[in-house]
């Protein structure tokens, strides 16, 4: 008992666990609820897109549907196929769900205590931990000892490994502006500059969005679980609560992807005029900040859902082609262009480095510095990236689609036919 | 108890380059109970075999023990998404061998209903084909329009799926009040809705990447394999029974046959989309003519018990899937001696192997969809 209290009162334990415990509990509760209600949102939004109603039976407007689903999944029979690798089959979904929940530790949900922790390698931590999640999928697919899960696992391993590269490279651009890897630091850098990095880095933002879709196995990149091809992919043999764990991991990953995009590109909880509404450090400020962050995250999640219900699915080879021939070269070109533009801006004296207590911050001068960076990103960055891509892919069939499609169709119009009748 | 030898399987699995994958008979996108046995190298298809017959009901044999009138409902259940077309083929075959005349008005109504059925069948194809490729939303849009057609069918036939009111010698019912308005209302909204699907698909890079150049079937190959219908026309062969051997009133209406050039999945898609437009034109022209014939008889002079003279006849129509033919041998009694069905789906399905080898698993799914099979017709 004494040992317990010694550990409990140890400064590191106390700083990182004990005092963070309320935040951890709240974040876990909120995120798991959000993950459940994302399913509801997905069903409602898809219904809206498809001209139908969606869930309406359980509770008003089907609002209790996620609860009913969870109860159903919990009470289902737990089936492990006879020839499956039992231990790995059991562990695999846990790996997936743990990997995605651990990432929540460094997501800046709001200022001060609203964030669980802020470490100086936050972005690297996210990339490292989230790539463990793919292990859960590979192992689950392999341990099922079945063919469709095997195909799904192979697809997802190839897909997630290649798109992680693109995502990491896309994040380099904004981090050059932020001069820090800390997630909170990235937001503070954008607050100091007053401009969200999506304006400086539109190419990187697009790459990150596409890569994020692929990383979370969302349509049009939902090949690991493409229903019409490989039934349910890696979780074909899973049912009941183990399946639910994969589901939770998937939807948590969507929230995380959107949260990273909101943090790095959309200024996190920063919003112009927020400091005028409430004094920084007060409870109202924190509340407003969290709401702003949530709104940004939901906007991106809405886009993810929107894409899913309007795009057809990529094929496996096309997916790899998109990753390696389009996104990664684009990200590399973007890094080069960004570096060149930054050096140029420094030489012209349009940006200056400000030393604050948290570290160095890059601040562009108003108005010419900001205008120069935005104009450079749009007028230099986008065309150069496009030229690079066009040169690399000039012989690819995907690039020359228009040349290939021709069809002879009837020449006579409707009016001509009815003129004779 | 039998103990599976997992160790040996695992070693084999590690050493093997090829994998045999059973796609179906329970699979989300084999459009029924088709079983495709795929031999894969990675995800590339190196060999393919179709196992059919899971839905075999012996319709041809059953027909030998039914009178000519009783046979007809069995035809609703062949291609169950295009029941009207199947019925038309059967009643025409019997009319041809028994020499029964059909009133002009009935012919126009038959053509209107058959063309509506063609649109409904193509809409169902569009929805499922797009869903196989991952565009789920199109499915519900297509079903929204199909629903309008089914409402017309419900009003006229009293049934939505197995619609059966065609009779040997004409029709069971005259058109109901408001039939013309309902059909015209559908024809009014339909072009807009077709545009809507095309905005989602035609200019979509992913859709193009998934369909252009996939499963190319040249005109020669298509003719050798005996495929018919949109699959043949997409390969560039201008062959349509409605033009080649006009039945009903197809020689009196004007329409075009859309023809593709490359014979790939995208061309098959374009051809079917254009066919829907042409069907709409046929319907509108028939509605104009029908007005002049209304009111009038819809059932010709038909004997109580149909006993066609001894002989044989082959008759075929252009069903939504292709050439649907019936070979009928009569022995002079009220029961046919032999009734053989040429199902377009079965024969078009044989082209799958030719198209799919060398492509990926995902393409096989797209190709099954692009051939447009219905297992009720394949297995009979």
Image (cartoon, coloured by chain):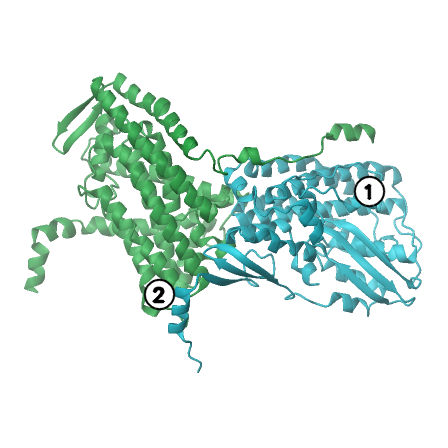
Chain colours: A green, B cyan
- Would residue B205 be seen by someone viewing this image from the given angle? yes
> In the figure, A34 relative to B27: above or below?
above
B38 vs A129, left or right, is right
Tell me the residue at 85%/47% (across/down): B106
User: Numbered disc 2: what chain?
Assistant: A
> Where residue A390 sits: x, y (%)?
43, 31
B362 vs B332, left or right, is left
> In the figure, A242 relative to B223: above or below?
below
User: Numbered disc 1: what chain?
Assistant: B
In which quarter of the view is residue A356 placed? top left
Which disc number belongs to residue A89? 2
Tell me the residue at 63%/47% (across/down): B217
Residue to which mark 1 is pinned = B250
In which quarter of the view is residue B311 placed? bottom right
Element type at marker 1? loop
Number of numbered discs overlaid on the protein picture: 2
As rendered, which of A252 and B200 lies closer to the eye? B200
As rendered, which of B351 and B117 lies closer to the eye? B351
> In the figure, B282 relative to A365: above or below?
below
> Where residue B68 sits: x, y (%)?
85, 63
What crowding class fits label 1: few (fewer than 14 Cα within 10 Å), some (14-19), or many (20 or more)? some
> Where residue A318 sits: x, y (%)?
46, 44
- Would residue A367 be seen by someone viewing this image from the given angle? no
Q: Quadrant of the C terminus of chain A?
A: top right
Contact, CB < 8 Å: mark 1 with mark 2? Answer: no
What crowding class fits label 2: few (fewer than 14 Cα within 10 Å), some (14-19), or many (20 or more)? many
Q: Residue furthest bottom?
A: B1
Q: Are marks 1 and 2 on the same chain?
A: no
Element type at marker 2? helix
As rendered, which of B379 and A275 lies closer to the eye? B379
């Amino acid at each position: 008992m004494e040992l317990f209290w010694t550990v409990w009162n140890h400064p590191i334990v106390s700083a990182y666990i004990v005092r963070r415990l309320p935040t951890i509990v709240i974040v876990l509760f909120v995120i798991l609820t959000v993950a459940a209600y994302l399913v509801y949102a997905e069903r409602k939004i898809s219904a809206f897109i498809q001209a139908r109603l969606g869930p309406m039976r359980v509770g008003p407007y089907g609002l209790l549907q996620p609860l009913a689903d969870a109860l159903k999944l919990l009470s289902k029979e737990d089936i492990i196929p006879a020839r499956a690798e039992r231990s790995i089959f059991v562990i695999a979904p846990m790996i997936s769900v743990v990997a995605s929940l651990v990432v929540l530790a460094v997501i800046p949900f709001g200022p001060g205590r609203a964030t669980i922790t802020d470490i100086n390698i936050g972005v690297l931590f996210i990339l490292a931990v989230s790539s463990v999640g793919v292990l859960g999928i590979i192992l689950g697919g392999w341990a099922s000892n079945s063919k469709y899960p095997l195909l799904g696992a192979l697809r997802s391993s190839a897909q997630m490994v290649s798109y992680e590269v693109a995502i990491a490279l896309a994040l380099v651009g904004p981090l050059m502006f932020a001069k820090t890897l800390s997630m909170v630091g990235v937001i503070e850098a954008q607050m100091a500059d007053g401009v969200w990095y999506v304006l400086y880095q539109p190419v990187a933002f697009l790459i990150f969005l596409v890569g994020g879709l692929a990383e979370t196995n969302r349509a049009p990149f939902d090949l690991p679980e493409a229903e019409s091809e490989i039934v349910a992919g890696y979780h074909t043999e899973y049912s009941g609560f183990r399946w639910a764990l994969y589901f939770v991991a998937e939807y948590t990953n969507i929230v995380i992807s959107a949260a990273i995009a909101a943090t790095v590109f959309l200024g996190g909880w920063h919003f112009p005029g927020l400091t005028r509404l409430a004094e920084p450090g007060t409870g109202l400020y924190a509340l407003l900040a969290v709401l702003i962050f949530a709104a940004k995250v939901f906007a991106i999640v809405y886009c993810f859902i929107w894409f899913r219900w309007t795009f057809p699915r990529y094929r496996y080879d096309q997916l790899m082609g998109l990753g390696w021939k389009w996104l990664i070269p684009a990200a590399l070109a973007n890094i080069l262009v960004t570096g060149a533009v930054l050096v140029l801006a420094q030489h012209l004296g349009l940006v200056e480095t400000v030393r604050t207590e948290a570290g160095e911050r890059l601040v562009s001068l108003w108005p010419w510095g900001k205008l120069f960076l935005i104009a450079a990103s749009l007028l230099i960055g986008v065309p150069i990236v496009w030229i690079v891509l066009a040169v690399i892919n000039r012989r690819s069939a995907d690039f020359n689609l228009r040349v290939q499609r021709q069809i002879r169709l009837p020449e006579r119009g409707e009016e001509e036919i009815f003129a004779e009748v | 108890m039998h103990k599976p030898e997992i160790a040996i399987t695992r070693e084999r699995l590690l050493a093997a380059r090829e994998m045999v994958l059973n796609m179906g008979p329970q699979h989300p996108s084999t459009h029924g109970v088709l079983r495709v046995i795929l031999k894969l190298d990675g995800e590339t298809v190196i060999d393919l075999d179709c196992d059919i017959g899971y839905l075999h009901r012996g319709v041809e044999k059953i027909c030998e023990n039914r009178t000519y009138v009783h046979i007809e409902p069995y035809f609703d259940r062949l291609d169950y998404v295009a029941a009207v077309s199947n019925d038309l083929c059967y009643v025409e075959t019997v009319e041809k061998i028994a020499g029964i005349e059909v009133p002009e008005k009935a012919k126009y109504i038959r053509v209107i209903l058959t063309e509506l059925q063609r649109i409904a069948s193509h809409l169902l194809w569009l929805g499922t084909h797009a869903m196989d490729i991952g565009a789920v939303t199109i499915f519900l849009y297509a079903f929204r329009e199909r629903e309008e057609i089914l409402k017309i069918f419900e009003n006229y036939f009293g049934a939505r799926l197995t619609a059966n009111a065609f009779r040997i010698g004409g029709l069971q019912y005259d058109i109901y009040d408001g039939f013309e308005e309902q059909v015209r209302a559908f024809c009014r909204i339909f072009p807009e809705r077709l545009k809507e699907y095309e905005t989602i698909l035609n200019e979509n890079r992913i859709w193009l990447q998934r369909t252009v150049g996939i499963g190319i079937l040249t005109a020669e190959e298509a003719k050798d394999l005996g495929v018919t219908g949109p699959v043949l026309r997409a390969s560039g062969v201008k062959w349509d029974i409605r033009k080649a051997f006009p039945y009903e009133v197809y020689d009196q209406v004007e329409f075009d046959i859309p023809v593709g050039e490359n014979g790939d999945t995208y061309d098959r898609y374009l051809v079917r989309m254009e066919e829907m437009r042409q069907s709409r034109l046929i319907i509108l022209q028939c509605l104009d003519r029908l007005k002049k014939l209304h009111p009038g008889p819809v059932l010709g002079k038909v004997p109580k018990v149909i006993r066609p003279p001894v002989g044989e006849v082959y008759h075929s129509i252009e069903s939504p899937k292709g050439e649907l033919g019936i070979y009928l041998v009569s022995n002079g009694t009220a029961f046919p001696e032999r009734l053989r069905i040429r199902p377009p789906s079965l024969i078009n399905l044989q082209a799958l192997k030719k198209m799919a080898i060398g492509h990926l698993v995902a393409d096989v799914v797209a190709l099954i969809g692009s051939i447009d099979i219905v297992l009720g017709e394949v297995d009979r």
